Image (cartoon, rainbow, N blue to C red):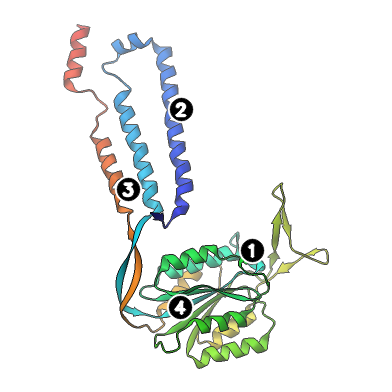
Amino acid sequence: MSFKNAYYLLPGGFIFILAVLLYIQSQRKMRKRRELFAEASMFQKVVSHDPTKRPLYKNILIIFSILCLIFTLARPQGSSYEDTVRGEGFDLIVALDVSKSMYAKDVAGMNRLEVAKIIIKSMIAGLKEDRVGLVVFAGETMIQSPLTYDKNSFLTFLDRASPALLTLQGSDLSGALTASIDRFEKDDERSKVIVLLSDGEDSNSKALDAAIKEATEKDIHIITVGIGSEEGAYIPESTDWFGYVKYLKHKGKNVVTKLDETSLKKIAEAGGGDYYRAKDEDTAIAVIKALNQVERSLVENVKVLRRRELYCWPLLLAFVILAVEWLISDRPFLSAQSDRDEDRI
């Protein structure tokens, strides 16, 4: 079993442990208050029923229902199974810049790579019967994921994308386009789209022009997304033992990386697409709308691997537990109440 949203487990586990500790603390305070009020034997005579067991059961059930809901949010998945796809789709290659400059924090308080991944994940969530692949690039390129219907597999490769994958630094946009073009199947009649996300800064204009020309000749639709700011930001290089960030330096001065929109706009215009500058969630929405305007081709009788969704079981268990908790009354049964009343008389 695996979890599609495993990032919920750590904060969810913290919330669960916190709930348990708070409950234990509240019980200790309640016990101390009782001891101040009266001795245990005298307290039993004063109250009409045992004040601890039923609330204890109810609270335990609530805590376990929280645990079930945490597992539901984490979206557990079981074994894979083969499914037949039929519908309309296109082939999409995502070209992601993973150069060190993408670590600069100048977009909504996050670094550029984080913002790019958020946009890509939003795009993937909006895809239907489309195949998607991933190319990462810096000063060189690498095929991170081939074209696939398996969105979960793609997202796994996306999460692993970082500057550590490549040794040669820079932003080789022309190489990224060429590698993306080569990923498409030559005889496939489906529409082909490249979404390139980068902070720009490609200096090889001749190679870029050649790559754009090749994409145009092969009728490949290109959308570009600029990540960064015109003001620029420093490039984090390392962190010392005290948490102090050390920045990339050149001749003793911190290197400032700025968004270069010129090449990105040029690519989008020549590729029949649009250029978007990443600012907030609206950027992802705009890219999704642009993708939805691309003509999709008929896809049928294609075998794909999917994972069995298991989140319904912890969700159902949470509802059952809460229902049982609701049925347990805080008040004693009538017979027990009557017995205690008779003892007093």
Amino acid beneath label 1: Tyr
> Where is mark 3, residue-wise?
314
Q: Is residue 82 left or right of residue 179?
A: left
Q: Are marks 3 and 4 in contact (CB under 8 Å)?
A: no
Q: Residue at x 35, y 75 (%)?
A: 129
> Where is mark 1, residue-wise?
103
Sequence-wise, the earlier of marks 3 and 1 is: 1
Sequence-wise, the earlier of marks 3 and 2 is: 2
For marks 3 and 2, give the CA distance.
27 Å
Amino acid beneath label 3: Pro
Sequence-wise, the earlier of marks 3 and 4 is: 4
> Where is mark 4, residue-wise?
92
**Where is residue 23 drawn, in percent x and y?**
42, 31
Q: Are marks 3 and 1 in contact (CB under 8 Å)?
A: no
| Residue 199 disc label | none
Badge 1 crowding class, 10 Å Cα cut-off, few under 14, some 14 to 19, many 20 or more, is: many
For marks 3 and 1, give the CA distance.
38 Å
**Where is residue 273 drawn, in percent x and y?**
50, 83
Q: Secondary structure at mark 3?
A: helix
**Where is residue 239 drawn, in percent x and y?**
70, 53
Amino acid beneath label 4: Leu
Q: Secondary structure at mark 4?
A: strand
Residue 276 location, quadrant: bottom right
In the rendered view of the protein, which quadrant contains the N terminus?
Answer: bottom left
Q: Is residue 175 left or right of residue 339?
A: right
